[in-house]
Structures are given as structure tokens and as C-alpha cells.
Amino acid sequence: MNSLPGLLVQVIDIYIYIIIIRAILSWFQIRPDSAFFPVYLFIIKITEPVLGWFRMQMRKLAPNMMIDFSPFIVIILLQMLRSMILGG
């Protein structure tokens, strides 16, 4: 595998893991005085641009939806992109 496609696949994999971590952390209340809070803010800052856009599109399609499916959709699309990069 060439170095650029390999690097892109690794970045996609890391981003998917970060999205999963964010989804799990959304079940907990992270207090601002927690030592983990800066890490939590970093995770939100790097995932919100993508997740927020998909969340906004989902609200247009289904305004009364109570569950946020944006992480699921983004992960599926990233997996598709990953497969295209790998040629499969």
C-alpha cells in the first residue's frame, strides 16, 4: 500500500474511534472541574464540525427524531471512504 492511502486509512480509523468514544461519553455527564474535561472538549471540537452538519441534515429530514443517528451515519460513510481508498 502506498504511504498516502495508508496514512488516510489510519486517519479515518482514528477518527472513527474518536466518534465512538464521543458517542459513549455522551451517556455520561462530564463536569467542567474534572481532569478529563479538556480531553472531552478536544473530542467535541474535532468531531462536531462533521457530526453537527449531519445532525442538521437529519433534523431537516426528520424533525421529530429523538435519537441522534449522526455518529452512525458518519461512521458508515467513513467506512465506505476507507473501502474506496483501499480499492475494495
Image (tube, rainbow, N blue to C red):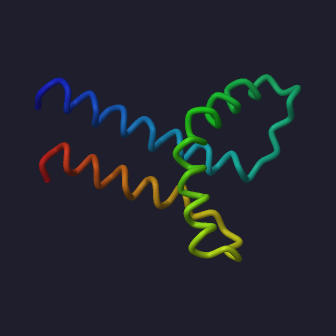
Q: Pick whichever, 78 or 17, lies toward us.
A: 78
State the residue in front, 76 or 60: 60
Residue 2 percent location from the top left of the image: 11, 27
Quadrant assignment, res 13: top left
Q: Describe residue 84's horizontal placement relative to residue 66 as left or right.
A: left
Give the percent coordinates (x, y) of residue 74.
Answer: 46, 54
Q: Residue at x 56, y 49 (%)?
A: 51
Foreground of the two, 24 or 52: 52
x and y percent of residue 17 in the render? 48, 41
* Number of numbered discs visible in the structure rendering: 0
The residue that appears at 36% across and 32% down in the rendered structure is 11
Residue 88 relative to residue 57: left or right: left
Question: Residue 47 lies in what quarter of the image?
Answer: top right
Question: At x 60% / y 58%, what residue is drawn?
Answer: 55
Up the image or down, 65 lies above or below 68; here it is: below
Up-down: is 48 above or below 43? below
Q: Name the spot of residue 78 as percent of width and height, x first.
A: 36, 49
| Left or right position of 66 against 43 | right
Q: Residue furthest front?
A: 60
Q: Is residue 36 left or right of residue 21?
A: right
Image quadrant containing the N terminus: top left
Residue appearing at x 67%, y 73% in the figure: 63
